[in-house]
Amino acid sequence: MGANLNDLTSDCVHCGFCLPACPTYALSGDENDSPRGRIHLMRQVITGQADLDTAVAEHVDSCLGCLSCVSACPSGVQYDRIIEEFRPQIEQTYAEPRGDRLFRRLVFALFPHPLRLRIAALGAVAYRRTGGAALVRSSGLLRRFPRLGAMEALMPPTTVRKAWRSQPAHNPARGERRRTVGLIAGCVQRVFFGDVNAATVRVLQAEGCDVEIPAQGCCGALSLHAGREDEAKRYARRMIDAFERAGEDRDGGGNALDAIVVNVAGCGSTLKEYGTLLADDPAYAERAAAFAARVRDVSEVLTDLEPVAERHPVPARVAYHDACHLAHGQGVRAQPRALLAGVPDLKILEPAEAAFCCGSAGIHNLVRPAAAEQLGRRKAERIRATDPDLVATGNPGCLLQIQRYLDEGPESSAGPEGSGAAQAAGSPKESVPVVHPIEIIDASIRGLRLNPRRIRR
Ligand code: SF4
Ligand code: SF4
């Protein structure tokens, strides 16, 4: 992406302030699994003092990309850029074991392709309804192949109707139009979390926004975070083309969209980076920078607007979880809380270790299920200790991961640090539903009774 890895890594002064913020270091206690240790290893490789062997690749690849270290670093080390610059070297030069390679291929042949995901959703519905799930679970197959087990456990519940439903392309503002925005539909989001997109559109309309949803593909976030830079660039170019066309359809000039709205934290942080990603592409550099400058998380757009839609009470205790790519990646922490604080009778709870990753981390919980499980249980314990009715988080991966470990209940949540927090909280509820914050705002505007048991996915 044009950055100089040598310069970027030399910014690190080895102070170690980032160590307590790093979840992988907290789990292993090995300095090589910390930001400082990984920067040291990468620097050794790029300066020719070490080879990119299995051990180095393993330490670097086990990084969640959660960016907690970026928030913690007082010297402004751009670890996010360092890891994105270095990962393609692992992808190109390090020969992964065959099983790992095949599994990653499967993930990248499926997840960035909404049509394939929709077909897979049909399979998932059949799997659950025909007794296939019970058969596979009792066969022991999922224990033998933990990655398949993780995939099965994280498979979002859906219906055929929900998976194949699409939002209309044009969604006019209710009342006076105050903004015209384009919406990023997301890949997993549009297929498995269409309710979140529908809620996003309704809230934006209620707040006076025309919402355009152009035909679009993947934003490239998964590819970029996994070191597949060329693939990410291809997706980014197509996304820019799609939104420029949508703008031209509105005013003939391509600039009619005041903002490009995203409700998935992982996608948002990549979309905001398009200017850097395509800086070396003469045909796209300027357009990518203009596109990135207009990208806003839905909570940013809504807090910029003076609310006009009445909020009705939602009497509930909601634990807010900061998705890493929203809090650390985009610095968006206050806006979702401010939005939720505008809902009468809603109490916002702040779990301990808010800055820690839940273990989802893109596809990390699929390719490294053991580490993700420890982090998932740890996160569920901290959340359960606040005794919430609901959990809110702005990323579908976090939503599935947290829901999975909350559903396990406190008894089986004996994570690496024991279950003290869970015991302190007791076991007040069977489980707690996890939602996107925009679903709470939508329910409040529509005056719906938000019954936690009813909204379980
Ligand atoms: S990354 Fe930042 S916080 Fe961590 S050791 Fe280097 S300078 Fe210190
Ligand atoms: S991105 Fe997260 S897991 Fe990776 S080094 Fe930084 S804090 Fe640790």
Image: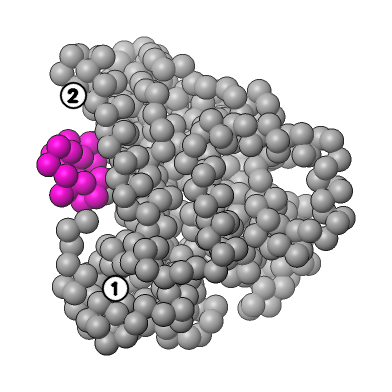
- Residue at the spot 67% in from the left edge and 73% down from the top edge: 415
User: Which kind of residue does numbered mark 2 sit on?
Assistant: Asn
* Residue 73 image label: 1
Relative side of 146 to 247, left or right:
right
Measured Cα–Cα span from mark 1 to mark 2: 37 Å
Q: Residue at x 27, y 29 (%)?
A: 241
Quick one: label 2, few (<14), some, or many (20+) residues within 10 Å?
some
**Earlier residue among tags 1 and 2:** 1
Left or right of 383, for residue 7: left
Can residue 75 be seen here? The reply is: no
The one of 213 and 3 positioned closer to us in this rendering: 3
Mark 2 lies on residue: 255
Between 332 and 428, the residue placed more toward the observer is: 332
Which contiguous range is marked in magenta?
Answer: 274-293
Q: Estimate the x, y position of residue 45 in percent, counting from the top left.
A: 29, 80
Residue 185 location (% of width, % of height): 44, 32
Number of labels in the image equals 2
Kind of residue sitting beneath label 1: Cys
How are the colours assigned in the image?
A: one colour
Disc 1 residue: CB within 8 Å of ligand 1: yes
